[in-house]
Image (spheres, helix red, strand yellow):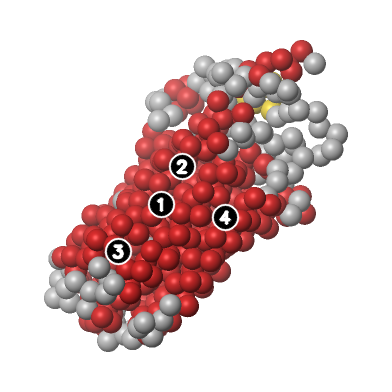
Amino acid sequence: MREVRDFYGRRYRVGESDRLLLGRSRSWMAGLPWAAMLAISLFQYGFGAALPTLAGASGWSVWQAFTVLGLWVVAQAAGSPLGGWLYQRVRPAVPMLLGAVCCLVALVTLAHSDDLATVLLGYSVLGGLGAGLVYMTCVATVTEWFPERLASRVAMVGAAFGYGAVPFVVVAGHVLDPANRAVVLDVAAVVVCAVVTVCGLMMRKPPGNWWPEHIDPQRWALDRRLNRGIAHNRPAARPYPPLAALRSGMLPMMFVVVVLTAAMALFDIAYLAGTAYTRGLAAATLVAAMGALAAANGLGRAVTSSLSDRVGRRATLGLSLLAGGVAQFGLLAAARNDNHPAALVCFAVLAGAGAGAGYSLLVSLVRDWFGDDATVANYGIVYSGKAVGGLAGVVLAGLVVTNPGSTVPFVVAGCLGLLGAAMTRWMRQPRPAWVSLPADGLEAKGR
């Protein structure tokens, strides 16, 4: 083992293979987080699909049901920075096991209780915290094990949080009813807890600044033939811990972008679920639209991660937010057309792809702009913006559902996406004035 530095002064620990450290390929450290994300995916989109059945069985009003969803989003966003903090200090098994227990309690509570206060505490608070712990631990694990393929691997793992919900969406829409609610949710609770527990026990962290031995990190930092992403994604000039990243002004802007992204995403989920509950939207239409929303949310991350290497993370983020904003006006047109199924599904795909891409792109953007040393901590701060945006999106959806025919919430949601796209044009990578950048490829190595 030895430590080397690249042109930018970044440190790398090289000489240790993944098999030496793990006893197996590091692909396990992508597969295990992927499976855990797949397991917890039902909490967001799955709850939306199950909302008509759960609210009807419990006698909740629309606003009460939306309170359950909104508080879950707040708790999940708050639990994510906590998961990152724990990951940096203890084994990944600790936050994963805590998350598994919280998820188990959450689903069991939803299965057996109709009391709103109990559900808010058991499902929304504990379930949200548990999902947040698992989410950030999975992102942190894949970030450290795949430093040279961060964008694609984070997208792969994050995508499971979207499309992984599709099977439960189908079950919630076509199978779940008040009579079998306890059985379906109890089974889901056991499966989620078991998967997250097993994955957590097997997950490991690499040594600090670890780098795969088969790639020269000094060449990787400069050679565009080896690392095609650096042409449009310059590495950080120096590490920015959270306070320095906040002072740069760019981390707060990323936080606002997450607020806007989450507002659109949760507006779409709550709107579809609330419309099905109050206006009798057909189960098949709800399943198709919610499933399309979840699947596109996941698959959009994979597509945009590849695109970001070619045109840049910031530009790709702007395009995804633009697509999400336009989709809200499409959903308005569908609503004006009596929620035509084909139109709902079509614009749900566009909305899901636009909103989902932002989360995975921001992990890479945070690393590129603020350095490797504090990627997990900085992204935890950025991701916490989901609490504010998610709550705003649920409120906007509640205004639509309780006031049929209203257009303002759709317009506001669409404008939030357009504002986010515009904000990306003002974002600039922090760079000290004294830093000299390489002109192209390996030419700078001899400077």
Q: Do the residues labelled 2 and 3 touch (CB within 8 Å)?
A: no
For the residues labelled 4 and 3, the Cα–Cα distance comes to: 23 Å
In front: 185, or 231? Answer: 231
Q: Which residue lies furthest to the top in this view?
A: 446
Cβ–Cβ under 8 Å for marks 1 and 2: yes
Q: In which quarter of the image is residue 58?
A: bottom left
At label 4, counting other C-alpha atoms closer than 10 Å, the crowd grade (few under 14, some 14-19, many 20 or more) is: many
Mark 4 and mark 2 lie on one chain; the one further toward the N terminus is: 2
Instruction: Kindly state the secondary structure of the residue where label 4 is placed.
Output: helix
On the rendered image, what quadrant is the C terminus found in? top right
Residue that badge 1 annotates: 353
Q: Nearer the viewer, residue 247 or 264?
A: 264
User: Disc 2 on helix, strand or loop?
Assistant: helix
Left or right: where 279 falls relative to 361: left
Identify which amino acid the numbered label 4 is placed on: Ala
Q: Position of residue 406 (x, y in %)?
A: 41, 81
Pointer 3 residue: 344
Of residues 23 and 384, the one nearer the viewer is 384
The residue that label 2 is drawn on is: 304
Q: In this view, does 341 lie above or below 409?
A: above
At 63% from the left and 38% from the top, the residue drawn is 368
- Report the residue marked by disc 4: 421
Gap between marks 1 and 2 measured at Cα: 9 Å
Q: In the rendering, at what x and y percent does residue 373 appear?
A: 66, 39
Nearest-to-viewer mark from 2 and 3: 3
In depth, the one of 132 and 411 nearer the eye is 411
- Mark found first going from the N terminus, 1 or 2: 2
Q: Which amino acid does label 2 sit on?
A: Thr
Say if residue 359 shows up in the picture.
Answer: no
Measured in 3D between alpha carbons, the distance from the residue under mark 3 to the one under mark 1, in whole angstroms, is 14 Å
| Percent of width and height locating residue 228 | 55, 25
* Label whose residue precedes the other's in the sequence (3 or 1): 3
